[in-house]
Amino acid sequence: MRSIIILPTYNEKENIKAIVREIFSLNIPDLGIIIVDDNSPDGTGRIADELAAGDRRIRVLHRQQKEGLGRAYVAGFKKALEDPEAENIFEMDADFSHQPKYLPDFLGAINSADIVLGSRYIKGGGVQNWNFFRRFISTSANFVIRFILGVKIRDLTGGFKCFSRRALLSLDFDKVESSGYNFQIEVNYKAYKEGLKIKEIPIIFVERQAGNSKFSTAIMLESFWKVLQLKFRKI
């Protein structure tokens, strides 16, 4: 049973080598990585190509422009599904906010679920290196979004996930409209409405130590309007 991790990158030259090295240090059998680079001006794509040249477990997709995290993941999913043996497909940040040490926990949980979400907001989960304001914004956003959409998922906005092959094939990503921050919410909601079995496991999210965060309050506030649109349109 093959597992593939999708790592989207944009200006991650300070992190990409280290995150790949740490992932493979776990010695997970039959594991591959697809790096999806959005033409990073800092040369991340070139570093990714060098990694792939030295390790056949790594593949690189180069996109010509930055079109949003969601579109990067969709491109990675489609590439992963070309491998008929790929059964577990991860989405994961390349900046160490999603810690590789949790990967075995995901693989244990996916055996009894269609999608496993790494959750900051269940018992045992949490965040490190966030100030009070960002904690408040994130927890409040998840509470409001959960109420609007009527779902029981505690962490709707997290981006550390594992999909079964069946789950990915059942979701029509060509109809997913969100390409940025709201992508995670929309995919979770569609999966919930499809009746897929979703399981949350606790993770500690660690704010990046190198490079610049893509998060902004403006992005978070924009998502509220998109959540309302999501609620009242046909899935």
Image: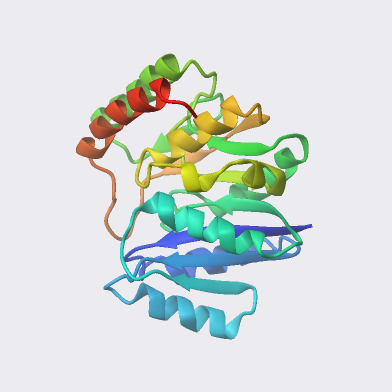
Please provide percent x and percent y for residue 65. Answer: 31, 66
Please state which of residues 113 and 150 is positioned toward the viewer in this rendering: 150
Please provide percent x and percent y for residue 218. Answer: 20, 37
Q: How many marks?
A: 0
Q: Is residue 133 left or right of residue 91?
A: left
Residue ranking furthest to the front = 234
Q: Quadrant of the N terminus?
A: bottom right
Please provide percent x and percent y for residue 203. Answer: 54, 38
Above or below 135: residue 66: below
* Residue at left offset 46%, top offset 30%: 156
Above or below 142: residue 159: below
Please provide percent x and percent y for residue 124. Answer: 56, 29
- Give the quarter of the image for residue 63: bottom left
Q: Is residue 2 left or right of residue 138?
A: right
Above or below 51: residue 111: above
Residue ranking furthest to the left = 218
Colour style of the rendered protein structure: rainbow
* Residue at left offset 50%, top offset 24%: 154
Please state which of residues 234 and 112 is positioned toward the viewer in this rendering: 234
Please state which of residues 176 and 80 is positioned toward the viewer in this rendering: 176
Q: Is residue 156 left or right of residue 105?
A: left
* Residue at left offset 62%, top offset 61%: 80
Please state which of residues 31 and 190 is positioned toward the viewer in this rendering: 190
- Give the quarter of the image for residue 172: top right
